[in-house]
């Protein structure tokens, strides 16, 4: 039997290629250095989370964690409003399917992990663009000092889910990989053709 800690190590290993490719292509601090670029990045993030959270929310009552405290779309909506920007919706939504709690947790592995560098990013753009949580940094500020605690809680919930049924590990892994690829498609390409809403 695969141990809990080993199941997470395997997940990190199996998603490392798509995760690193996203990081390498994104190069946030190098590629986003103006208010216009920052605003466009927020619009892209908003579309990633709009689509992904809609998929996960279907399983909200079955998730082994409090879904309401994990939602990040309201923070992005707040940031866009502060910067007087409108969301842009992808015409042909590309978010991968989500057909089980395990697949929802795989998506959340990517979404929750996106918060981990928030404090560094918030400090960077606070200094560079003069922003604060009320004027465009709400998403990256996240849960502040509680971010690490919530991440560990998520990992424990994910470990328990896989321990209860080891076959779920494959579902989690495939879903996480597809979600990394979806985020890459949105975040690393020129602003997509879309419609305002």
Image (cartoon, rainbow, N blue to C red):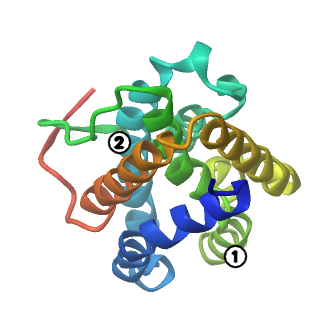
Tell which tag, 2 or 1, sits nearer the viewer: 2
Identify the residue at image location x=39%, y=83%: 24
CA–CA distance in space, label 2 to label 1:
26 Å
Q: At numbered mark 1, what does the secondary structure look like: helix, strand or loop?
A: helix
| Picture quadrant of residue 165 | top right
Q: At numbered mark 2, what does the secondary structure look like: helix, strand or loop?
A: helix
Judged from this view, the residue extending furthest toward the bottom is: 30
Visible in this render: residue 85? no
Report the disc number at residue 165: none
Most foreground residue, 51 or 178: 178
Horizontal side of residue 104 vs 87, given as left or right: right
Crowding at mark 1 (Cα within 10 Å: few <14, some 14-19, many 20+) = few
Question: Which residue is under mark 1?
Answer: 127
| Picture quadrant of residue 183 | bottom left
Query: Residue 149: x and y, percent?
Result: 85, 51
Judged from this view, the residue extending furthest toward the top is: 61
Position of the C terminus by quadrant: top left
Identify the residue at image location x=79%, y=46%: 150
Crowding at mark 2 (Cα within 10 Å: few <14, some 14-19, many 20+) = many
Judged from this view, the residue extending furthest toward the front is: 1
Picture layout, residue 58 above or below residue 112:
above
Identify the residue at image location x=36%, y=57%: 177
Horizontal side of residue 110 vs 175, given as left or right: right
Query: Residue 14: x and y, percent?
Result: 44, 68
Identify the residue at image location x=46%, y=76%: 28
Report the disc number at residue 47: 2
């Amino acid at each position: 039997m695969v141990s809990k800690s080993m199941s997470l190590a395997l997940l990190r290993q199996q998603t490392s290629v798509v995760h690193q490719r996203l990081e390498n292509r994104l190069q946030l601090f190098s590629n986003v250095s103006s208010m216009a670029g920052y605003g466009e990045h927020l619009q892209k993030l908003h579309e990633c989370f709009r689509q992904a959270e809609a998929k996960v929310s279907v399983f909200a009552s079955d998730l082994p964690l409090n879904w309401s405290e994990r939602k990040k779309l309201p923070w992005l909506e707040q940031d866009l409003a502060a910067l007087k920007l409108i969301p842009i919706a992808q015409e042909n939504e590309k978010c991968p399917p989500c057909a089980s709690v395990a697949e929802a947790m795989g998506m959340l592995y990517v979404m929750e992990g996106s918060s981990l560098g928030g404090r560094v990013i918030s400090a960077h753009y606070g200094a560079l663009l003069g922003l604060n949580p009320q004027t465009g940094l709400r998403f990256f500020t996240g849960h502040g000092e509680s971010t690490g605690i919530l991440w560990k809680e998520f990992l424990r919930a994910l470990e328990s889910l896989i321990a209860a049924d080891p076959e779920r590990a494959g579902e989690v892994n495939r879903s996480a990989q597809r979600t990394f690829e979806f985020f890459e498609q949105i975040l690393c390409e020129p602003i997509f053709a879309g419609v305002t809403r």
